[in-house]
Amino acid sequence: MSSILIVGGSHAGVAAASALRAEGCSGAIKIIAQEPTLPYHRPQLSKEALREEVFDPQPLRVENFYEKNGLVLLRGATASQLHLKDRCVVDANGQCHDYETLILACGASPRKLPEAVDPERRALYLRNFDDLRALKVRLASARSMAVVGGGLIGLEVAAVALVKGVSTTLLEAGERIMQRSVSRSISNYLADRHSANGLDLRLGTTLASIGRQAGGEGDVVVLEGGETLSVDLTVVAIGIAPNDGLARQAGLPVADGILASEQGCTTDPAVFAIGDCAAWLDPVSRRHIRYEAVNPGQEQAKMVAAAIAGRPVPALGVPRYWTHQGAMNLQMAGDVHGVTKEFVLKAPESGAFSVLGFQDDRLVAVQTVNAPRQFMPLYQLIGTDRDHLSAELDWEFPPPHHH
Ligand SMILES: Cc1cc2nc3c(=O)[nH]c(=O)nc-3n(C[C@H](O)[C@H](O)[C@H](O)COP(=O)(O)OP(=O)(O)OC[C@H]3O[C@@H](n4cnc5c(N)ncnc54)[C@H](O)[C@@H]3O)c2cc1C
């Protein structure tokens, strides 16, 4: 049986190792994992991990899972070169790891502010457990904070800070928050709720620079237009960039992610790419799409494991996402940008509802607020038309509310 090497020991990489065993691959499987921590649940870092006083990361798998399944997990090891011809990966200590099949699951890193904007490197970022530790120390004694970026992570961090009584200002360059992942109606709903909780939300606001307060420990944040804010710390969450350097140096095509087929194979048939680092060909739009969430990476892992095992490969499902922001628990799926009309469906729980997004008569997006039980049944109906949906939900659609 062939030997399989996985670079990256997080959601996608660990899911791939486990799926390979589930598919009956009995050969050697080795994971090269840069972080020293036992692979852990990353989404917690901006949620409970930040909220709780003392926090240990929750492992993806118990420690003996790896040994029990014959998986070699090299923690604190970095893959620094990939030689496609020799089928080997060289780690930072110069050791060579041969493979017959390679799975790249290197994830992504926070996009950093340009040096001109943050010359003293004042900004804090949040991607891994080390980042969390640094942020928790600063947040513990903070009374004020600036957050740059109104995406999922920025809003989650801001929501925790507000609960802790930290006066928080959030700068979002765009005209609404979470623009990439939710519809305008949900953006507005979230903005209202965060503002009601005390968030000083500045839309259409760009950061000009960050520097150290004269004679103080905190930051001076200068906005485009000249206004300045004095804060104890600044968290920057302006998106991520895929860790595709290893692949690029090896000569594999990359373009905002390692380019891969609709089943995750790169231009080298022995090399696959999954998770946040990979841009898979989407069979419908014929574009390469890179997802930045746990669920699609895990599905890709299962698909690649099936392909390697020579089994039928399932199709990639519609990616699902979730976020917890204060008392709001959102789940979402589908293409919110293709939506031409929306319906609101109330859930039995108080204050809970779902927004169904249609393109013409077809359900293309579902967004659920505090209605976890409503989400999956609706998710499974994505792609179906209105009549089918009415019958399934036993529900008469109110007149459409056009955008
Ligand atoms: C704070 C935060 C909150 C989030 N919340 C949510 C959420 O609520 N819902 C959701 O769906 N998603 C959420 N996400 C996104 C989700 O965590 C990612 O989509 C997911 O972790 C991607 O998994 P991955 O395995 O592809 O990559 P990653 O988790 O980035 O892991 C890649 C791993 O590879 C390692 N690595 C990289 N290069 C090398 C190398 N050369 N050699 C060895 N190892 C290497 C990295 O150190 C890292 O450990 C959140 C992310 C963050 C940071």
Image: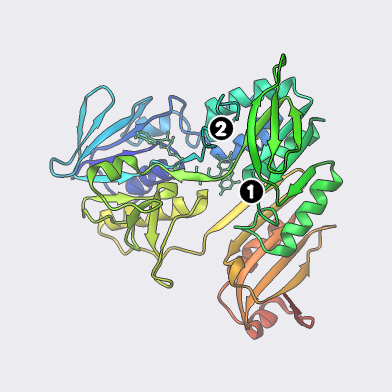
Left or right of 363 on screen, residue 13: left
The picture quadrant where one finds residue 83 is: top left
Residue at the image point whose x is 21% and y is 41% from the top: 3
Label 2 element class: loop
Nearer-the-camera pick, 316 or 140: 140
Residue at the image point whose x is 78% and y is 57% from the top: 189
Residue at the image point whose x is 51% and y is 34% from the top: 40
* Residue 81 x, y percent position in the rendering: 25, 34
Is there any visible trace of residue 54 in the rendered image?
Answer: no
Q: Amino acid at mark 1?
A: Gly
Nearer-the-camera pick, 351 or 374: 351
Residue, disc 1: 151
Query: In the current view of this chain or complex, which residue is farthest to the front?
Result: 226
Above or below residue 296? Residue 170 is above
Nearer-the-camera pick, 298 or 227: 227
Left or right of 121 on screen, residue 138: right
Marks 1 and 2 sit apart, C-alpha to C-alpha, by: 24 Å
Q: Which part of the image, by quadrant, shows the N terminus?
A: top left
Chosen colour scheme: rainbow
Above or below residue 395? Residue 13 is above
Residue, disc 2: 58
